[in-house]
Every structure is written in C-alpha cells, then in structure tokens.
C-alpha cells in the first residue's frame, strides 16, 4: 500500500510472547504515560519508550527526551524488537528510540506524520502485538487519498523512502480479537533513528 511495506506474521507466537514480557519490564522501569497534545487534547493511547531517547508530548510540544518524566533513563530496546529492525529496516544502524503505544478499548490515533526526527532518510519500523488495529495510510499531504489495512499481532510495517512521511493513524482496534494481552488491547512499537 503506497510504499508502506507490511510483513505479515514477522514474529511467531513465541517471539510475540517474549517481546510482551520484555515490554512489561520496560513499563515497570518507565511507566506508561497518558500523553497530552501540545494543543491540550488528551490522547487515548498510553505511551512509553525504550532506547537512548523517548518520544514525549505535552504542552511544551512533541519532542524526544533523554529521560522519562519521572527522571529515570529509558530502558534498553528489547532484543526481539532490535532483531526486527535489523531484519526489516534495510539500514545498518540501530534505532535510537522505540516508542511503545498501548491501545485500550476505544483507543485510536489520528492521522499524523512522524516528523520529529532529524533525517527522514532513516525508516520507521513498527511492530504490532495483541488486538487487530485498522491502520490507515495516505500520502505526504493530509488531503491525499488513504487506504486501510488491519494490522495483526506479529505484523511488521515499514515506512521508508517515499512512504517515510506518509500520513498514518489507527482508526480503531478490534478489542479482544487477540488473546495475547490477557486483558485485551493492542501494543504498537515504532522504532526510529532520531538524530
Ligand atoms: C504510530 O503511528 O505511532 C502508531 C501506529 C500504530 O499504532 O500502528
Ligand atoms: Fe506514527
């Protein structure tokens, strides 16, 4: 779909389960936050990060920060996520940030571009876990036509080349469609090179 590559079932069930358990450790060290847009809107997803820097948003804007708001360092990116990056990114440099989005029932993410990074020649690689999410992708203007695809647990999506700055978002999730997260929900990881 418009240059966004989707790799179905890139992670088998054993790796999905291991990655989920690694993410519980990430969230223990760097708890999920309830992000607010610079314009003051509460986002419906919960967020945290792993890596050298983490992506945050609040009244001061969208940005990468060296520490979680609690003052702790962001935990390391789980090895399974790094393996996915090394396999599918097509680049020989590791990511600086792995943003972790948690979608509970009714959560969504509006159409946006990932453009807080310094160099858009590096791709963004995303991993989906848990419930299915309806991923919408368009072009590099908000008005461009969009297409949608359901991302399932274990799928990987790569935004690179012309698609690196494609508008994208999650319209809705099918809450309870996967048994991976005991209480339902979807987790999406997006890895980025920041500088
Ligand atoms: C994002 O764009 O940060 C998340 C995309 C997704 O949840 O699949
Ligand atoms: Fe994004």
Image: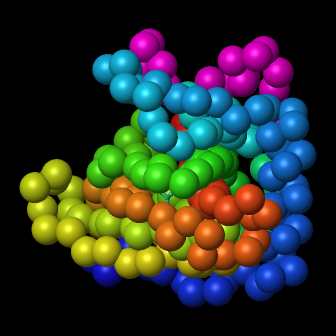
Part of the protein shown in magenta: 57-76
Image location of residue 82, percent across then percent down: 76, 62
The C terminus - image quarter:
top right
Horizontal arrangement in the rendering, residue 187 relative to residue 167 (left or right): right
Camera-side residue: 88 or 20? 20
Q: Is residue 136 above or below residue 1?
A: above
Camera-side residue: 111 or 89? 111
Q: Is residue 149 above or below residue 9?
A: above
Residue 40 is drawn in which quadrant?
A: top left
Answer whether residue 70 is magenta in the image.
yes
Residue 28 is drawn in which quadrant?
A: top right
The N terminus - image quarter:
bottom left
Q: Main secondary structure of the magenta part?
A: loop
Give the colour scheme shown.
rainbow
Camera-side residue: 152 or 15? 152
Q: Residue at x 41, y 69 (%)?
A: 134
Q: Is residue 90 above or below residue 33?
A: below
Q: Residue furthest left?
A: 143
Q: Residue at x 73, y 74 (%)?
A: 179
Residue 145, visible in the rendered structure = yes
Horizontal arrangement in the rendering, residue 158 relative to residue 79 (left or right): left
Image location of residue 71, percent across then percent down: 78, 15
Answer whether residue 92 is magenta in the image.
no
Horizontal arrangement in the rendering, residue 99 relative to residue 25 (left or right): left
Q: Residue at x 48, y 64 (%)?
A: 173
């Amino acid at each position: 779909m418009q240059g966004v590559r989707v790799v179905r079932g890139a992670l088998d069930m054993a790796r999905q389960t291991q990655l989920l358990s690694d993410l519980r450790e990430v969230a223990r060290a760097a708890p999920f936050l309830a992000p607010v847009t610079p314009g003051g809107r509460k986002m419906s997803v919960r967020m945290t990060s792993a890596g050298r820097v983490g992506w945050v948003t609040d009244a001061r804007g969208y940005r990468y920060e060296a520490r979680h708001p609690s003052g702790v360092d962001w935990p390391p990116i789980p090895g399974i996520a790094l393996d996915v990056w090394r396999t599918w990114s097509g680049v020989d440099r590791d990511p600086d940030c792995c943003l972790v989005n948690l979608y509970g029932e009714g959560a969504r993410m509006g159409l946006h571009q990932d453009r807080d990074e310094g160099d858009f020649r590096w791709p963004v690689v995303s991993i989906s876990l848990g419930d299915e999410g309806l991923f919408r992708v368009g072009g590099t203007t908000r008005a461009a036509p969009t297409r949608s695809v359901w991302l399932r647990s274990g799928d990987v999506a790569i935004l690179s080349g012309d698609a690196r700055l494609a508008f994208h978002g999650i319209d809705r999730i099918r809450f309870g469609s996967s048994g991976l997260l005991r209480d339902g929900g979807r987790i999406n990881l997006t890895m980025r090179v920041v500088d």
